[in-house]
Image: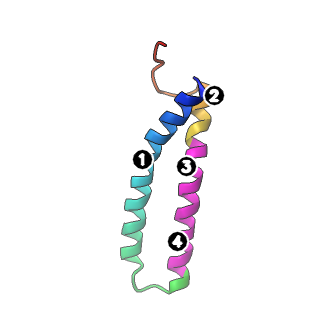
Amino acid sequence: MSATTVIGWTLVHFVWQGAVVGALIWIVSMLTRRSPASLRYAVFVAALAVVAAIPVVTAFPLSSGRSALPRLAT
């Protein structure tokens, strides 16, 4: 896969993956509403770290050819 294709598919996947993380963090924030601020802060920082790592983790299998995506003829 070319670099442009890998970046494009990574961005496409990041849209739904980011939405999933956002939905999960919203649910967790509702469940921890009365918890100490330090716990909620740690949860949000962890979610931010996950969101930052998602594109890297997604791009690796795409660039190495071990992806489940179909190969498009160019």
> What whole-number distance in Å separates the C-alpha atoms at marks 3 and 1?
10 Å
Q: Earlier in the sequence, mark 3 or mark 2?
A: 3
Q: Residue at x 46, y 26 (%)?
A: 69
Give the percent coordinates (x, y) of residue 3: 60, 29
Q: Residue at x 54, y 77 (%)?
A: 41
Residue that carries the numbered disc 1 in the rendered image: 15
Q: Earlier in the sequence, mark 1 or mark 4?
A: 1
Three-letter amino acid code of the residue under disc 3:
Ile
- What is the number of the mark on residue 54? 3
Three-letter amino acid code of the residue under disc 1:
Val
Q: Secondary structure at mark 4?
A: helix
For the rendered model, the colour scheme is rainbow
Q: Earlier in the sequence, mark 2 or mark 1?
A: 1
- Where the N terminus falls, by quadrant? top right
For mark 3, does the 10 Å Cα neighbourhood hold few (<14), some (14 to 19), or many (20 or more) residues? some
* Magenta range: 39-57
- What is the number of the mark on residue 64? 2
> What whole-number distance in Å separates the C-alpha atoms at marks 2 and 1?
21 Å
